[in-house]
Image: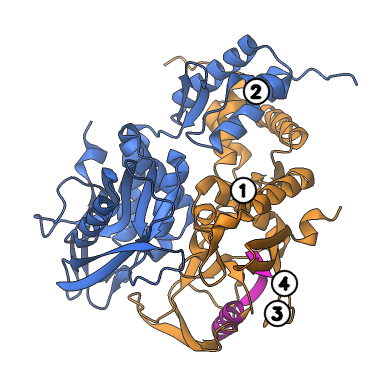
Chain colours: A orange, B blue
Amino acid sequence: MIQLKIKRNERIAAMTRILCSHPNQIYTLHYFSELFHSAKSTVCEDIAIIRDTLLTFGLGDLESIAGAGGGVRFIPLAEKESTEEYVGNLCNILCDTSRILPGGYLYMSDILYAPQQLCRIGEILAARFLNTRPDFIITVETKGIPVAVMTAFALGCPVVAAKRNGQITEGPSVSINYVAASSRRIQTMSLPKRGIKEGSRALIIDDFMKGGGTARGMVQLLEEFNVDVAGIGVVIATREPQDKMVKDYASLMVLEQVNETDKQIKLSPSTWITVK
Amino acid sequence: MIQLKIKRNERIAAMTRILCSHPNQIYTLHYFSELFHSAKSTVCEDIAIIRDTLLTFGLGDLESIAGAGGGVRFIPLAEKESTEEYVGNLCNILCDTSRILPGGYLYMSDILYAPQQLCRIGEILAARFLNTRPDFIITVETKGIPVAVMTAFALGCPVVAAKRNGQITEGPSVSINYVAASSRRIQTMSLPKRGIKEGSRALIIDDFMKGGGTARGMVQLLEEFNVDVAGIGVVIATREPQDKMVKDYASLMVLEQVNETDKQIKLSPSTWITVK
């Protein structure tokens, strides 16, 4: 069989698709070299071109990993400017007063279940916690699951979802009781023992934080597994109470007020999003 | 300011990243032409190169849309061969007898919460239902959510998650009672009225189907909203009962048996995955 020569243009298109669809997954030079029947030096030149282009257009970065298990991986880092603009726009969308629900809740399910929004939100949270090197992401069902999945997609790690009522069909589990800060009621949170490795590191991701009771519950649950907390990230945190049940967390947005009577919503990007 | 000329290699890297990270989202030629300060004819040539490469390597397809709102979009279609191989491997992974849980359940949460597996599963389900042109995906909490999100990501449409116990904090909702085929127990499923448009089309996605009662419940719920069912897709369906409560559905895999006593699992790819 005659092996057709694959041109640089074509190698770049194929490599970009493969790398960008598998964020934070390491591909060896050998893999691409075999795929294209090209020398590793050629593949290195291709990688340099893709990297420069991604950086120029603020579309991400490629990281080269040296050594035997080495290769290259895609990091979906957005530019600071475009992140700030994106989160600002999201605040504007969410501040539409028709989103105020009875009880002073804010309707945001359309955002939390829109894959393209989640993709962007996940990339921003992933970039924030990339250096904490989590082994997996933990969330608690239900609304936190989509954002946890997309953050994990960007980080290239798995997700574990704790259950609220302890109906575990996945074998032996560990449960804790925790106090939801907002309702002051005691609730249960469970995690199957299977699939959690002692001594690993977990990033806690959720959609919303008010008092921090749920996040505190996840921290406690992880302690039972001897798992370190790499960080806590949420999409929206309320300004009040300022004294939350967990100390270190990062939210994309801060919710100051949802006023049912006056039809007012005050929501703004967090300072780490806007500070230069 | 001197405008640097952007080379073909660079345009191809940037376009591939943008298109592949936004499956089924239409980008106009104008958009790329502005981004790169290039003629539309040049952009068209770039698109042709990317398209040929994606097809050659079985990495997807680009579709050109004619007319005023026209442009190009990425369709994450995998080759038949690689899909068959992928689903075959997934069956092998899931047939590990250590996955048998008390009660004859099959442990599959690690797969259903692993973003890279979900990405692939979502692409396969999206390809299966692409031509049915759904406006949104519906699933029911909890385990179906990740696969629904990733299928929606591949299709470029939003997700709506029905709730099981009717605790809707999102304003007025519609509830139905349905019979879970396996337990014969009456359950409730609710959907907020907000966010569902009458006359639209929904694709039902779930992780697992046994009797089809849950899928039937979603069909009934959609009827209340005058929403058409574009299709029903699940990751695993059991062989028995063959007479399920919904007629047309597609599953990636068919589960014939989980035998707790003999430690046996029989799981295979569905015929539409393997038939040439």
How much space separates mark 3 and mark 4, taking CA atoms? 6 Å
Q: What residue is disc 1 on?
A: A120
Q: Are marks 1 and 3 on the same chain?
A: yes
Residue type, mark 2 in image: Phe
Q: Chain of mark 4?
A: A
Q: Tell which circle, 1 or 3, labels the residue nearer the N-terminal end.
A: 1
Nearer mark to the viewer, of 2 and 3: 3
Q: Which residue appears farthest toward the left when viewing the image?
A: B243
Q: What residue is disc 4 on?
A: A239
How much space separates mark 2 and mark 1, taking CA atoms? 20 Å
Q: Give how far across and how far down residue B190 sits, in percent.
A: 33, 64
Secondary structure at numbered mark 1: helix
Q: Give how far across and how far down residue B148 sits, in percent.
A: 40, 52
Residue nearest the observer in this picture, B269 or A238: A238
What is the quadrant of residue B109 in the picture?
bottom left
Q: Chain of mark 2?
A: B
Picture quarter with the N terminus of chain B: top right
Q: Tell which circle, 4 or 1, labels the residue nearer the N-terminal end.
A: 1
Q: Give how far across and how far down residue B41 sits, in percent.
A: 61, 9
In the drawing, what numbered circle is on residue A241? 3
How much space separates mark 2 and mark 4, taking CA atoms? 40 Å
Q: What residue is disc 2 on?
A: B32
Q: Which residue appears farthest toward the front when viewing the image?
A: A261
Q: Residue at x 64, y 79 (%)?
A: A211
In the image, the segment drawn in magenta is A213-238
Residue type, mark 3 in image: Pro
What is the quadrant of residue B201 in the picture?
top left
Q: Are marks 2 and 4 on the same chain?
A: no
